[in-house]
Image: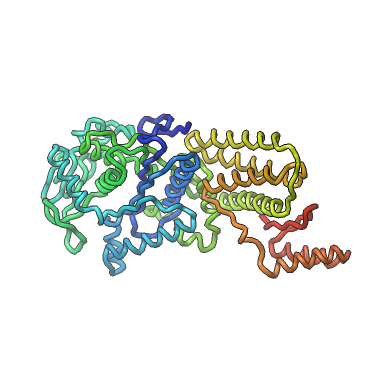
Amino acid sequence: MIKIYNTLTRQKEEFVPIQAGKVGMYVCGPTVYNYIHIGNARSTIAFDTIRRYFEYRGYQVDYVSNFTDVDDKIIRAANELGITAPEVANRFIQAFEEDTKALNVEPATAHPRVMDHMPDIISFIQVLIEKGYGYESNGDVYYRTRKFSTYGQLSDQSIDELEVGASQRTGAEQSQKEDPLDFALWKKAKPNEISWDSPWGPGRPGWHIECSVMATKHLGETIDIHGGGQDLEFPHHENEIAQSEAKTGKKFANYWMHNGYVTIGDDDQKMSKSLGNFITVHEMIQTVDPQVLRFFMATTQYRRPIRYSEATMKEAATNLQRLRNTFDNLKFRLATAEKSLADDTKYLAELEQIEQRFIEEMDDDFNAANGITVVYELAKWLNTYLEKTTVSADVLANGEALFTQWLAIFGILFTSEELLDEEIEQLIEERTQARKNRDFARSDEIRDQLKEKGILLDDTPQGTRWRREA
């Protein structure tokens, strides 16, 4: 039984899908004006891991994640680069796809774009106006926040608290509103910026309305799960609820999930473009194994903050290498194993117990930190029995199947093609022959030569095994 911490109710709840065996998830995607930084990647990886676990548990997941491809930041980037806003968006959507593919993120079922949904957005706003939730003011359209009685419930803020903050804002836009708390549904076009025709004149949508429209269009008026970064809880997701439920009269999302920040530095400062303390994924994967970054991000419980540093990345690389060594040892043993007549009952029972522990941990709000601990337990169990002839190849094959399935949930894929290049293979073969000829000086010389290349050798009863130095 999967339990999810619901931000709306601030407690863990049993997950009950709208449609049995299926999950509809909407996760807010990037505003595509630059490369994503590793703080953005945290959300993408966290919800990809959650999606993969749902699939492991037998659910069919309809996973929708949008691209915000029209926005003030995109317009500024277009002006700076001397190209159009759509060209900026296309460039960085392609970069997003390349970077997330390197991180082994599964493509969404749908990646809707704002520019493709203008008629839907205008129609949505018209309904809000007709119902008295929206109003036009000098070419802009605003949402009457006070009319939505539960506004502030998601972020656990009262309307009075919000009013204090809103009343301190100044500027021409504020003077056009009926109430400082009101937010934009449609923005009047400024000179020389991209716009679309509407009943209120040329303009473009406000940020919040975009996700309300795309989520309900692709997943229905009520969806199972809506997710995103902790920073989107207010005002973005709060406003999505107000807009969507005002239009449909139905609950917008049954479960709200928010991932924690990536922090950096001794003061654990949130990583963000606005603070200028970010590292882009595009830059990072030029020098760091993308699987290490994925492993680092995916193995922390999604609601917890992640502290980024060279030390934490090095620790992730070491732990991932240990798991890779187990995978390589398994492949070698299974390739050379002979059939055994041993009784497998004891070992299969142990495997089943390990599997139940993994499910229990991950069912508890996708607790990846505890889940990966069970993966380490499985690796230890496999390593313990790799050399025992009383354990059949069938048992080890079952263990390998679990091991690779669980690693895949965390987005880790080991392949046998990563092995040795031809030169090193020849050296191992030459050393094997030297040992047969009792030429131990040459054997030791080759071992030292391989060690310099980061290859460690283990001489086992089944033959010589190699592993990469952690």
Q: Residue at x 44, y 61 (%)?
A: 98
Q: Residue 120: x and y, percent?
A: 21, 49
Position of 152 with respect to 319 (left or right) is left
Q: From the image, which quarter does the C terminus lie in?
A: bottom right
- Position in image of residue 454 (x %, y %): 69, 61
- Residue 331 in view in this figure: yes
Q: How many marks?
A: 0
Q: Which of the colour schemes (rainbow, by chain, secondary structure, one colour) is used?
A: rainbow
Q: Is residue 43 above or below residue 15?
A: below
Q: Position of residue 461 (x, y in %)?
A: 80, 52
Q: Is residue 14 left or right of residue 140?
A: right
Foreground of the two, 256 or 356: 356
User: Looking at the image, which is closer to me, 429 or 324?
Assistant: 429
Q: Tell me the quarter of the picture where residue 132 sits.
A: top left
Residue at image position (29%, 41%) is 220
**Vertical placement of residue 127 versus 290, above or below:** above
Above or below for 38 versus 388: below
Question: From the viewer's perspective, is residue 173 above or below residue 354?
Answer: below
Q: Position of residue 8 (x, y in %)?
A: 35, 33
Whether residue 269 can be seen here: no
Quadrant housing residue 354: top right
Q: Residue at x 31, y 53 (%)?
A: 112
Choose between 385 and 458: the one closer to the eye: 385
